[in-house]
Image (cartoon, grey):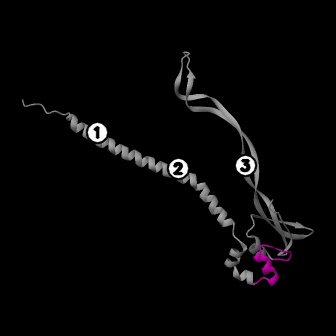
Amino acid sequence: MGPRANSTLPLTQYTNLLGRRKGFQNRLHAQKTLFNVLRMKIFFFLPFFALFAASCSSSQTPDSRIAKNPKIFRALELEQQSLVEVGKIQNGMTPAAVFLAWGSPDRKAEGEKDGNRYEQWIYNSLSPVVLQSAWGGRGWGPGWSVRRSGIAGPGWGPWGWNGGIGTNVAYIPSASSWVKFINGKVESWQRGRPE
């Protein structure tokens, strides 16, 4: 019988293969890490982008609404045109004129008073509210513990209770302005002043 074929690789070939494999794993790990970092950045900045986009769309000026609706603006009386251009309204204006001056309402309501049906447009602004909060719970992480045997030592696992008290500011929408229309004309209105 001839010499038996050796099924094991020589040491140098094995280390070369292992080195290539480790290099591939390191590249794969780096790609996964980069992907995770990019994903975290996207999810971190997404709320800020959404807030920016919402603020841009809701902060339209009377000039931008007039530019988008020139026919409505030209149909107004000259006195109303001058008021709309500076974002003001007066009794007797139509809903279209109020839209050009103040924009779309955040909500609408309708009702009846003294036999007259009316429509009310309500505009919101954000009001800060200070919240007190308390938190607590069992945490995970590095620390010291006393095991059943009475031996203390470092390790990783659930360690004790932690907690705290803090304040937070939340912004809630509240009605700041309203316009009441009777028979398609402004009957009364109220606008809050910034503090």
Q: Quadrant of residue 122?
A: bottom right
Farthest-out residue, left: 1
Residue 155: x %, y % from top left: 51, 26
Q: Which of the labelled discs sits on residue 169, or is there none?
A: 3
- At 29% from the left and 39% from the top, the residue drawn is 18
Q: Is residue 152 left or right of residue 23?
A: right
For numbered disc 2, what is the local secondary structure?
A: helix
Q: Is residue 68 left or right of residue 130?
A: left
Span of residues in magenta: 75-93
Q: Horizontal and vertical percent for residue 116?
A: 89, 71
Q: CA distance from mark 2 to mark 3?
A: 25 Å
Give the labeled residue for mark 1.
Answer: 18
Residue nearest the observer in this picture, 188 or 157: 157
* Circles 1, 2 touching at the beta carbon (< 8 Å): no
Give the image location of residue 126, x and y in percent. Answer: 75, 57
Quarter of the figure with the C terminus: bottom right
Q: Along the polypeptide, which appears first: circle 1 or circle 3?
A: 1
Q: Decide: few, some or many residues near mark 2? Use Cα within 10 Å; few <14, some 14-19, many ≥20.
A: few
Q: Secondary structure at mark 3?
A: strand
* Amino acid found under the numbered disc labelled 2: Met
Location of mark 2 (residue) = 40
Residue 90 lies within the magenta run: yes
Q: Measuring 12% from the left and 31% from the top, which residue is drawn there?
A: 4
Which residue is found at the position 81% from the left and 80% from the top? 80
Q: Is residue 193 located in the magenta-colored stretch of the structure?
A: no
Q: Is residue 5 left or right of residue 143?
A: left
User: Which residue lies most toward the top here?
Assistant: 149
Sequence-first disc among 2 and 3: 2
